[in-house]
C-alpha cells in the first residue's frame, strides 16, 4: 500500500458534538491535506464500544498503578488493587463513549495516524499543547474527572497506531461506506512532477 493511502479512525465524542465543535475539528484535520473518505453520526452500542477499546488486563493494571501513584502523592491510601482501579477507569470510558451521539470518520493520507494524533494532542486536555484540539477547546483534567468518578472529557478519539486504526475502522465502518476518490489537492501533495500547473 502506498503511504498516501494510510487511513485512521477519528471520533468526535458526544462532548464535542454537544459543544458544536464537529466542524472545527474536521476543518483542522482537512487543512493538513488529509481527506475524509467516510463519515457518519451514531450512538455507539456498548458491545461495539467494548470491542473498540479492546483493553486487556495489562492495560488496566498500568492505568490502575498510575491511579495509585496519584493517590499516594495526595496522601491517600489505596483501598483496591491496581487492576480494580484500572477496570473502573475502563468502565467509565465505556459509559462516556456510549452516552450520546458521536461523529465518526475515516481520513486518508500520508502518516494519517501520526498527523491526527499530533493535531488532537495528549489524552489529558490541561496538559495538551496549545494549538492542539484538546489543548485549545477544553479545560477538563484527570484531577477533576477522578474527583467526580468519571472519564476525562477530551472531545476526540483517534487511533494510536496504523494497525489499531485498521481494526477500529472495521468496527465502525463497512467497506462500502468508505469511498475511494481523487481530490484536486492530492496533485499538489503527491504528484511526483507537479506538472501541468502552468498553461
Image (tube, rainbow, N blue to C red):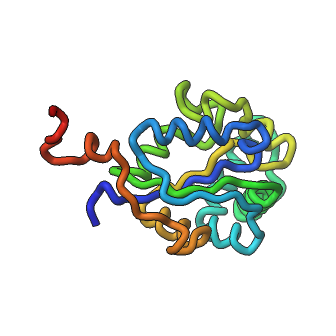
**Residue 86 to residue 57: above or below:** above
Question: In this orientation, which residue lies closer to the viewer: 143 or 157?
Answer: 157
Q: Is residue 62 visible?
A: yes
Q: Position of residue 134 (x, y in %)?
A: 62, 35
Q: Which residue is farthest right? A: 148
Measured along the vertical axis of the image, is residue 26 above or below residue 104?
A: above
Q: Is residue 139 left or right of residue 160?
A: right
Counting from the top left corner in percent of width and height, residue 191 is at 20, 47
The residue shown at (79%, 42%) is 18
User: Which residue is most to the front?
Assistant: 199
Question: Image point 61% across, 68% down: which residue?
Answer: 172
- Image coords of residue 58 (percent x, y): 59, 66
Farthest-out residue, top: 130
Task: Give the position of the N terminus as an image quadrant.
Answer: bottom left
Q: Position of residue 136 (x, y in %)?
A: 62, 27
Q: Is residue 123 left or right of residue 17?
A: left
Amino acid at each position: 500500500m502506498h503511504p498516501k493511502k494510510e487511513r485512521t479512525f477519528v471520533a468526535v465524542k458526544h462532548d464535542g458534538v454537544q459543544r458544536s465543535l464537529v466542524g472545527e475539528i474536521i476543518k483542522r484535520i482537512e487543512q493538513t491535506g488529509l481527506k475524509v473518505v467516510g463519515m457518519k453520526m451514531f450512538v455507539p452500542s456498548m458491545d461495539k464500544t467494548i470491542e473498540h477499546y479492546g483493553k486487556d488486563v495489562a492495560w488496566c493494571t498500568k492505568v490502575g498503578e498510575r491511579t495509585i501513584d496519584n493517590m499516594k502523592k495526595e496522601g491517600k491510601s489505596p483501598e483496591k488493587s491496581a487492576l480494580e482501579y484500572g477496570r473502573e477507569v475502563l468502565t467509565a470510558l465505556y459509559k462516556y463513549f456510549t452516552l450520546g451521539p458521536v461523529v465518526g470518520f475515516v481520513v486518508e493520507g500520508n502518516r494519517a495516524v501520526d498527523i491526527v494524533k499530533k493535531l488532537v494532542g495528549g489524552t489529558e486536555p490541561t496538559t495538551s499543547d496549545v494549538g492542539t484540539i484538546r489543548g485549545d477547546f477544553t479545560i477538563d483534567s484527570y484531577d477533576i474527572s477522578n474527583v467526580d468518578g468519571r472519564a476525562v472529557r477530551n472531545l476526540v478519539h483517534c487511533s494510536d497506531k496504523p494497525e489499531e486504526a485498521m481494526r477500529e475502522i472495521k468496527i465502525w465502518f463497512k467497506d462500502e461506506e468508505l469511498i475511494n476518490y481523487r481530490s484536486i489537492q492530492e496533485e499538489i501533495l503527491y504528484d511526483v512532477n507537479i506538472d501541468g500547473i502552468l498553461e
